[in-house]
Image (cartoon, rainbow, N blue to C red):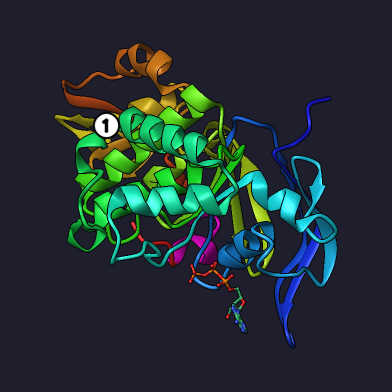
Amino acid sequence: MTTAAFDIDTLRVTYGEVVALDDISLRSAPGRITALLGPNGAGKSSLLQALSTALVPAAGTIRIFGHDTRRQPALARRRLGLVFQERTLDEDLSVWQNLWFHARLFGLPRHDARQAVNRLLAQFELTHRAGDAVSALSGGLSRRVEIIRAMVHRPGLLILDEPTTALDPQARRRVWDDLRRLRTEAGTAILYSTHHLDEAEYADDVVIVDGGTVVRRGSPDQLKAGLASSRVLLSTADDALALTSLAAAGFDAGPHSAGIAVHCAEPERRIAEVIAALTVPVRSVSVRRPSLDDVFLALGAAGAEVRR
Ligand SMILES: Nc1ncnc2c1ncn2[C@@H]1O[C@H](COP(=O)(O)OP(=O)(O)OP(=O)(O)O)[C@@H](O)[C@H]1O
């Protein structure tokens, strides 16, 4: 069996009397992308901090590529790349110097450090910014440099706490292009927390935490498939009459802000049948598939506080 990129077993994290995480068990294979979702205070940062070895768990174990974070923290850290919420680049240094010092800190010999930095800058198309002072970089660019810095020592697992918070949509897209490229080209496993539901769609596995426990997990499709919210939306010349015809034909139909919603598992395949059941002209037809927003709404409290 492949060694898991991370393997968390019955983790409990406390701050004095406050229980931030309780009985969390999660694992992920190398190369997989995992999104951690949940409202403020759910425990996302605590989980990432414990994985990073910055927090010592009250109970349970964490293994990073087989290395126990409590007993072998240095070995675990070597396999980790970390990008936390606050900006942590040295503002007085250039992009290249920031990357170089990080590589040296991780023990790369000078020649290897230079090669690693140059290779990553080229891979992420930032060679032309190598000499720029970090203080002059935009928020989006400094976040990208932080991601590159986290990758200089070639970790197998990259952990990011809300990597795109405060970035504009274009910068967010660049960061996601980088992250997906890392998975494809370097096979890096990625674990990130986010408040942006659309960003959870990039993940292979989505883990929803609330109140310090895992409340749902699965692929984005699995989470959405658990909801009965796929539907055909219709607008007709006479919606009241159309509803009567649909009910008579056995459809689960009801009024909707768009006109009529017909609930069914595979809406694309049922459109022809839905229209055939009608005796009034149809003005518009569309299909509504559930989104991760719907998953959050279905979860109630956990969903309500997540920003769109
Ligand atoms: N240093 C601390 N001391 C005491 N309690 C803390 C500390 N850090 C976090 N907590 C508590 O632990 C719980 C989990 O917090 P955590 O920051 O991990 O949540 P989060 O999901 O990352 O929230 P956010 O989305 O706001 O960053 C919360 O109840 C929080 O108040």
Is residue 208 depicted above or below 270 in this figure? below
Question: What residue span does the magenta drawing correspond to?
Answer: 295-304
Give coordinates of residue 294: x percent, y percent.
45, 47
SS under mark 1: loop
Residue sitting at x 29%, y 66% = 91
Is residue 301 within the magenta segment?
A: yes
- What residue would you read off at disc 1? 125
Q: Percent from the top left, x then y, of residue 33?
A: 55, 37
Residue at point 46%, 31% (across, down): 182
Which residue shows up at 47% across the image and 28% down it? 264
Looking at this view, is 57 or 270 the one in front?
57
Q: Is residue 159 above or below residue 232?
A: below
Q: Please identify the quadrant where the C terminus is shown.
A: bottom left
Report the residue that reaches farthest toward the bottom. 17
Residue at 20% across, 56% down:
138
Number of marks drawn: 1
Q: Is residue 187 left or right of residue 92?
A: right
- Nearer the observer, 202 or 30: 30
Residue nearest the viewer, comparing 155 with 63: 155
Instruction: Determine whether, in the image, residue 306 is placed left or right of residue 14.
Output: left
Residue 16 locus on image (x, y percent)? 73, 87
Left or right of 257, for residue 10? right
List the single residue furthest toward the front: 110
Residue 192 seen anywhere in this rendered image of the structure: no
In the rendering, at what x and y percent does residue 250 appear? 48, 25
Q: Of helix, strand and loop, which mostly describes the magenta segment?
A: helix
Foreground pick, 142 / 288: 142
